[in-house]
């Protein structure tokens, strides 16, 4: 058998040395492949074809791929099946490298029909390399079903090979339909490399995923998911005003809803805090954002949240923000003068700093009140310094 294959390879080399046109060469390799008497000869011929790395060989490659996919259902022997899988795999690698769109239909059939998850993954990656956007929806459904546990595998390596392939291909296809499944992969129970790969893919899949993320924010009840929505949008290429819109929606939900679940409480707090941080960076002169931040301050969910909201208001160079801060500071002054005891002066000092950062005259009266209120000397000196920043 070995001698026969060697003789066959010698024949191949002699044939390849003959000067011929591109179409003739393609036809020649097709005939050679079709006359191969066993799988070893097919692999030998295909290896020679692939070594040329020539787009003129695409018809040969796609025809061979179609034939092997069609013959899969007729193979019963496990050894023959594995040899066929090996051959299909090397053909897929080459059509992907050559970006042969003609191979899309057969690559998709391999991704659906074979029982080898690693070959399925290779077929899925091939669809990405040849930019087969017509299969973006099917691959999105596959990834969604895996995330939901509808499609199961016997080993973690198997499922993650297909999940990673779906992520890679959906990133290349850049279709909105693939964004949500990749998002849920990024918070799924996968290994860290898979999760990180999903995070990176989302940045490149859609330039502005805000609308897609708003849908998730609206329809998902888990605050861990909602919090992750903000993280993803913040890393995205969306314009700042769009990021601000999402942050406002998230903060509005965070101010409206409550939960008795301790785990959910943690993520709800993180969601409000992240939204406030994003508004500090992206809100600009958005008065609606300032009103939400003021409500967050007044609800006093936690010291961290209150201080974050005050800092966000302080970043706004806006008279509206200054008036909201001044009104809150005046209320604190009134409580202090009425004898109310505060556990610390962190909140009043943060409010003073915020007014100094805004630098709008609307904060002057409240700051002057501090100097004549029963606050500590450090707090009164802080108010005096803030007044000096106001023009």
Image (cartoon, helix red, strand yellow):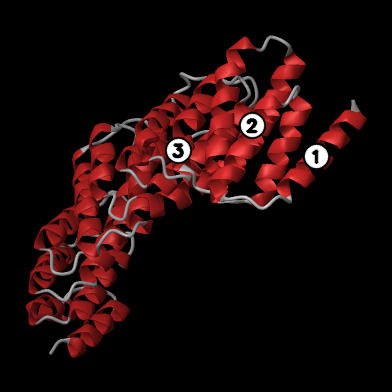
| Closer to us: 354 or 252 | 252
Q: Residue at point 44% right, 30% down?
A: 105
In this orientation, does residue 230 appear?
Answer: yes
Q: Please tell me how crowded label 2 is: few (under 14), some (14-19), or many (20+) other residues with Cα within 10 Å.
A: few
Label 2: which secondary element? helix
Q: Quadrant of the N terminus?
A: top right
First-in-chain label (3 vs 2): 2
Whole-number angstrom distance, CA of label 3 to CA of label 2: 20 Å
Task: Please tell me whether mark 1 or mark 3 is closer to you in this view.
Answer: 1
Disc 3: CA contacts within 10 A as few (<14), some (14-19) or many (>=20): some
At 8% across and 79% down in the image, what residue appears?
365
Task: List the residue tagged with mark 3.
Answer: 102
Q: Secondary structure at mark 1?
A: helix
Q: Which residue is mark 1?
A: 11
* Closer mark to the observer between disc 3 and disc 2: 2
Label 2, label 1: how far apart the Cα atoms are: 13 Å
N-term-proximal mark, 1 vs 3: 1
Crowd around label 1: few <14 · some 14–19 · many ≥20 (10 Å): few
Image coordinates for residue 359, horizontal then vertical, percent: 17, 82
Q: Position of residue 214 (x, y in %)?
A: 24, 43
Q: Are marks 2 and 1 in contact (CB under 8 Å)?
A: no
- Total marks placed: 3
Between the residue at mark 1 and the residue at mark 3, the CA separation in whole angstroms equals 29 Å
Q: Which residue is mark 2?
A: 31
SS for dot 3: helix
Classify residue 204 by image quadrant.
Answer: bottom left
Q: Is 141 displayed left or right of 239 in the figure? A: right
């Amino acid at each position: 058998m070995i001698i026969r294959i060697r003789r066959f390879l010698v024949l191949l080399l002699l044939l390849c040395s003959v000067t011929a046109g591109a179409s003739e060469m393609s036809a020649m390799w097709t005939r050679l492949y079709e006359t191969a008497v066993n799988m070893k000869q097919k692999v030998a011929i295909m290896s020679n074809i692939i070594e040329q790395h020539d787009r003129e060989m695409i018809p040969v490659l796609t025809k061979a791929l179609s034939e092997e996919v069609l013959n899969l259902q007729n193979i019963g022997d496990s050894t023959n099946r594995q040899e066929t899988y090996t051959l299909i795999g090397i053909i897929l690698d080459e059509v992907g490298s050559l970006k042969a769109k003609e191979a899309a239909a057969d690559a998709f059939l391999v991704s659906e029909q074979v029982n080898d998850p690693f070959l399925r993954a290779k077929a899925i990656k091939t669809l990405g390399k040849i930019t087969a956007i017509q299969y973006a929806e099917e691959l999105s459904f596959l990834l969604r079903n895996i995330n939901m546990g509808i499609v199961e595998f016997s080993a973690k390596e198997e499922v993650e090979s297909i999940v990673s392939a779906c992520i890679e291909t959906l990133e290349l296809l850049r279709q909105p339909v693939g964004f949500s499944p990749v998002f849920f992969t990024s918070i799924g129970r996968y290994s860290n490399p898979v999760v990180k790969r999903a995070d990176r893919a989302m940045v490149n899949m859609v330039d502005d995923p805000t609308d897609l993320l708003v849908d998730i924010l609206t329809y998902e009840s888990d605050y861990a998911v909602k919090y992750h929505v903000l993280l993803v949008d913040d890393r995205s290429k969306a314009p700042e005003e769009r990021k601000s819109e999402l942050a406002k929606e998230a903060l509005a939900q965070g101010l409206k809803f409550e939960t008795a679940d301790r785990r959910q409480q943690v993520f709800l707090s993180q969601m409000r805090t992240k939204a406030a941080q994003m508004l500090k960076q992206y809100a600009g002169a958005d008065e609606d954002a300032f009103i939400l931040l003021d409500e967050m301050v007044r609800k006093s969910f936690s010291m961290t949240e209150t201080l974050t909201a005050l800092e966000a208001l302080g970043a706004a160079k806006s008279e509206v923000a200054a008036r909201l801060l001044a009104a809150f500071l005046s209320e604190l002054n009134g409580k202090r003068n009425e004898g109310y005891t505060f556990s610390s002066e962190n909140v009043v000092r943060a409010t003073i700093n915020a007014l100094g950062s805004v630098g709008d005259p609307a904060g002057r009266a409240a700051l002057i009140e501090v100097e004549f209120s029963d606050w500590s000397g450090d707090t009164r000196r802080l108010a005096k310094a803030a007044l000096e920043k106001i023009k």
